Amino acid sequence: MASSEEETSTGCPAPVGTGTASSDPDPDPAPAQSDSTEDFEVLEEDEDDLSELPPLEDVGRARASPPPEPPEDTRCPEPGPGETPEPPQEWLDVLGNGLLKKKTLVPGRGAESRPRKGQEVTVCLRAALEDGSVVEEDPGLTFTLGDCDVLQALDLCVQLLELGETALIVSDAKYCYGSHGRSPDIPPNAALTLEVELLEARDGPDLELLSGKEKVALANRKRERGNFYYQQADYVLAINSYDIALKVIGSSSKVDFSPDEEAELLDVKVKCLNNLAASQLKLDHYEAALKSCNLVLEHQPGNIKALFRKGKVLAQQGEYREAIPILKAALKLEPSNKTIHAELSKLVKKHADQKTVETEMYRKMLGNPSAGSAPVKCKDKLPWSIPWKWLFGATAIALGGVALSVVIAARN
């Protein structure tokens, strides 16, 4: 079961610019119940094979061959009568690694008209595969520049466009859909050619003046973008999107919200924090994931996903004694959940093994390495050795006798 907003997917391919995910890593609307085992299965599956997904910071490798020239049918319309076409520009290697290149087709209004990060931009977009197949046409795609709301190739290159400029962008799959592709029209590891015209750039909305509905809608767009990156196994960008959504929700407001709007904002916040914890776990950021789980539990102490993930974090840190009761609390809320059962059983065994190891270590520290060996007895006591208690008593009696003699002598 998924919430109504998660059920709006029709199975059609998402726009190239946005790449919206088809599923939410945290789709539950109920705060104290897990309506689907999908979330737990994500955590339970083996580590994802990221060998085919180049790291974001890897900018040292160049393509073996120059980027392909774009097909003719993806170019912008020819200049109208009376317009003088500009001479073709050279390719600009945007990142210096040969994987993302830009060429101006129609110049814009000058460098001072370039958009800034944080502004909302509107572009005319056409995208095609290397064989010329057009996979997207959008005459008015709007997004926040620098927020990773769209494909990296588009987000990085639009910052270099001048207002009114039309440019051609040839991008390696790394900055588009990577090794996953986009079913059914974009295969894995597919390079894309994007033709982009920058139509408008304006300042983003003032978060303090947004209504409750507007703030919920904006936060949900950022969250859904995080879900897309999560599905692409790009957990760094997923965390970035969830953080932006949480900043939107937590921003101050000059507008009064209704109780229903407050409840909606809290629901989105909990989803973002749960998904943030899931992404942080994937990157082994245990302290950050623990903080995210605790924030969820502050609002919803019975949130099963947060309890489960908190138990996972503590277990990863070797804190089995603390993790076990947390998982037991989650299991009490949903006794039929097989994933929690399996995780709890695994932790109980690990805890027992840990105690065995600790017991053996203490034995060795105390000089008794063998568990079955009998206590060592002292067989070499000297026959003339005197117990210290007996010696102390004898000394006390002697001193008492001396004191009595002094008293008697004084009376006489």
Image (cartoon, rainbow, N blue to C red):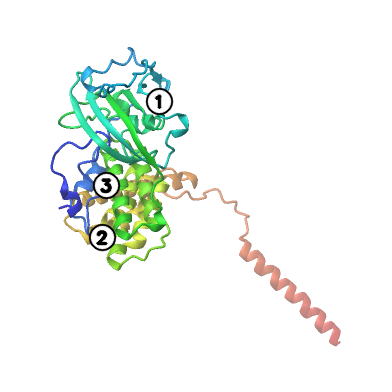
Task: State the residue position of label 1.
Answer: 58
Compared with residue 278, is residue 112 higher up or lower down, i.e. above or below?
above
In the rendered structure, the answer to whether residue 125 lies left or right of residue 158 reads left
**Residue 104: which quarter of the image?**
top left
- Tell me which numbered mark, 3 or 2, is placed earlier along the sequence: 2
State the image coordinates of residue 299 (x, y, percent, origin top left).
34, 62
- Which of pointers 3 and 1 indicates the residue nearer the eye? 1
Compared with residue 230, is residue 309 higher up or lower down, i.e. above or below?
below
Nearer to us in this view, 113 or 297: 113
Any part of residue 373 in sight? no
**Residue 281: which quarter of the image?**
top left
State the image coordinates of residue 234 (x, y, percent, origin top left).
32, 35
* Quadrant holding the C terminus: bottom right
Check disc 3: other Cα within 10 Å, few if <14, some if 14-19, many if 20+. few
Q: Secondary structure at mark 3?
A: helix
- Say which residue appears at 43% left-offset and 33% top-offset: 114
- The dot on residue 201 is none
Compared with residue 332, is residue 66 higher up or lower down, i.e. above or below?
above
Nearer to us in this view, 230 or 405: 230
- Tell me which numbered mark, 3 or 1, is placed earlier along the sequence: 1
| Residue type, mark 3 in image | Lys
In the rendered structure, the answer to whether residue 39 lies left or right of residue 269 reads left
Disc 2 and disc 1 in contact, CB within 8 angstroms:
no
Task: State the residue position of label 2.
Answer: 31
| Residue type, mark 2 in image | Pro
- Tell me which numbered mark, 2 or 1, is placed earlier along the sequence: 2
| Residue type, mark 1 in image | Asp
Spatial CA span between label 3 and label 2:
26 Å
State the image coordinates of residue 185 (x, y, percent, origin top left).
16, 29
- Say which residue appears at 37% left-offset and 29% top-offset: 157
Q: Secondary structure at mark 2?
A: loop
User: Furthest-bottom residue in view?
Assistant: 411
